[in-house]
Image: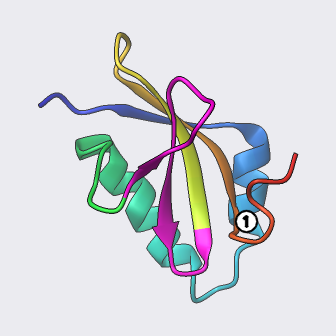
Protein backbone atom coordinates (compact mmCIF):
# COMPACT_ATOMS: atom_id res chain seq x y z
CA UNK A 1 0.00 0.00 0.00
CA UNK A 2 1.32 3.45 -0.90
CA UNK A 3 2.07 6.04 1.74
CA UNK A 4 -0.37 8.92 2.07
CA UNK A 5 0.52 12.56 2.50
CA UNK A 6 -0.88 14.18 5.65
CA UNK A 7 -2.32 17.70 5.42
CA UNK A 8 -3.73 19.62 8.36
CA UNK A 9 -6.32 22.34 8.03
CA UNK A 10 -5.21 25.49 9.84
CA UNK A 11 -8.10 25.11 12.30
CA UNK A 12 -7.07 21.51 13.07
CA UNK A 13 -3.50 22.66 13.70
CA UNK A 14 -4.78 25.23 16.20
CA UNK A 15 -6.91 22.55 17.91
CA UNK A 16 -3.89 20.24 18.06
CA UNK A 17 -1.84 22.96 19.76
CA UNK A 18 -4.54 23.30 22.45
CA UNK A 19 -4.51 19.62 23.44
CA UNK A 20 -3.35 18.70 26.96
CA UNK A 21 0.35 17.84 27.19
CA UNK A 22 -0.28 14.17 28.00
CA UNK A 23 -2.55 13.71 24.94
CA UNK A 24 -0.51 15.61 22.36
CA UNK A 25 2.22 12.96 21.71
CA UNK A 26 -0.41 10.23 21.31
CA UNK A 27 -2.45 12.36 18.89
CA UNK A 28 0.62 13.18 16.78
CA UNK A 29 1.61 9.50 16.69
CA UNK A 30 -1.92 8.52 15.60
CA UNK A 31 -1.83 11.11 12.80
CA UNK A 32 1.56 9.84 11.58
CA UNK A 33 0.27 6.24 11.56
CA UNK A 34 -2.59 7.33 9.28
CA UNK A 35 -0.03 7.98 6.52
CA UNK A 36 0.73 4.25 6.37
CA UNK A 37 -2.77 2.93 7.11
CA UNK A 38 -5.71 5.34 6.75
CA UNK A 39 -8.08 2.63 7.99
CA UNK A 40 -6.56 1.57 11.34
CA UNK A 41 -8.40 -0.71 13.77
CA UNK A 42 -11.18 1.21 15.48
CA UNK A 43 -11.69 3.73 12.68
CA UNK A 44 -15.30 4.80 12.06
CA UNK A 45 -16.78 6.26 8.91
CA UNK A 46 -19.04 9.19 9.72
CA UNK A 47 -22.61 8.84 8.55
CA UNK A 48 -23.74 11.43 6.04
CA UNK A 49 -20.25 12.09 4.69
CA UNK A 50 -18.65 10.57 1.61
CA UNK A 51 -15.03 10.31 2.77
CA UNK A 52 -14.89 11.48 6.40
CA UNK A 53 -13.61 9.19 9.15
CA UNK A 54 -12.66 9.50 12.79
CA UNK A 55 -10.19 7.74 15.02
CA UNK A 56 -10.07 7.74 18.84
CA UNK A 57 -7.17 8.91 20.96
CA UNK A 58 -8.42 8.50 24.51
CA UNK A 59 -11.26 10.99 25.02
CA UNK A 60 -10.24 12.89 21.90
CA UNK A 61 -11.21 12.35 18.29
CA UNK A 62 -9.28 13.01 15.09
CA UNK A 63 -11.60 13.63 12.14
CA UNK A 64 -10.11 13.32 8.68
CA UNK A 65 -10.98 12.97 5.01
CA UNK A 66 -9.30 10.51 2.67
CA UNK A 67 -8.64 11.45 -0.95
CA UNK A 68 -7.76 8.09 -2.51
CA UNK A 69 -7.12 9.51 -5.99
CA UNK A 70 -4.40 11.88 -4.73
CA UNK A 71 -3.19 9.78 -1.74
CA UNK A 72 -3.92 12.62 0.69
CA UNK A 73 -5.34 12.54 4.20
CA UNK A 74 -6.66 15.90 5.37
CA UNK A 75 -7.02 16.30 9.13
CA UNK A 76 -10.18 18.33 9.72
CA UNK A 77 -10.65 18.43 13.50
CA UNK A 78 -8.88 17.33 16.66
CA UNK A 79 -11.14 17.84 19.67
CA UNK A 80 -12.58 16.30 22.80
CA UNK A 81 -15.34 13.80 22.07
CA UNK A 82 -18.03 16.06 23.55
CA UNK A 83 -17.12 18.90 21.15
CA UNK A 84 -15.87 17.28 17.94
CA UNK A 85 -19.25 16.72 16.26
CA UNK A 86 -20.59 20.24 16.94
CA UNK A 87 -20.46 22.70 14.06
Outermost residue to the left: 1
46 vs 34, nearest the viewer: 46
In the picture provided, is 53 more to the left or to the right than 84? left
Residue 9 appears at what percent x and percent y? Answer: 69, 37
Q: Which quarter of the figure is the N terminus placed in?
A: top left
Q: Which residues are magenta?
A: 43-60
Residue 46 appears at what percent x and percent y? Answer: 55, 42
Residue 85 appears at what percent x and percent y? Answer: 75, 54
In the picture provided, is 55 more to the left or to the right than 17? left
- Mark 1 lies on a secondary structure that is helix
Q: Quadrant of residue 73?
A: top left
61 above or below 38? below
Q: Which residue is mark 1?
A: 17
Q: Quadrant of residue 19?
A: bottom right
Identity of the residue drawn at 69% across and 83% down? 20
Residue 68 appears at what percent x and percent y? Answer: 35, 19
In the picture provided, is 18 more to the left or to the right than 44? right
Amino acid sequence: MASYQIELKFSALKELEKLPRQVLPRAIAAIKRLAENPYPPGVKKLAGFERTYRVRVGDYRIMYEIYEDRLIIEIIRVKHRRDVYRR
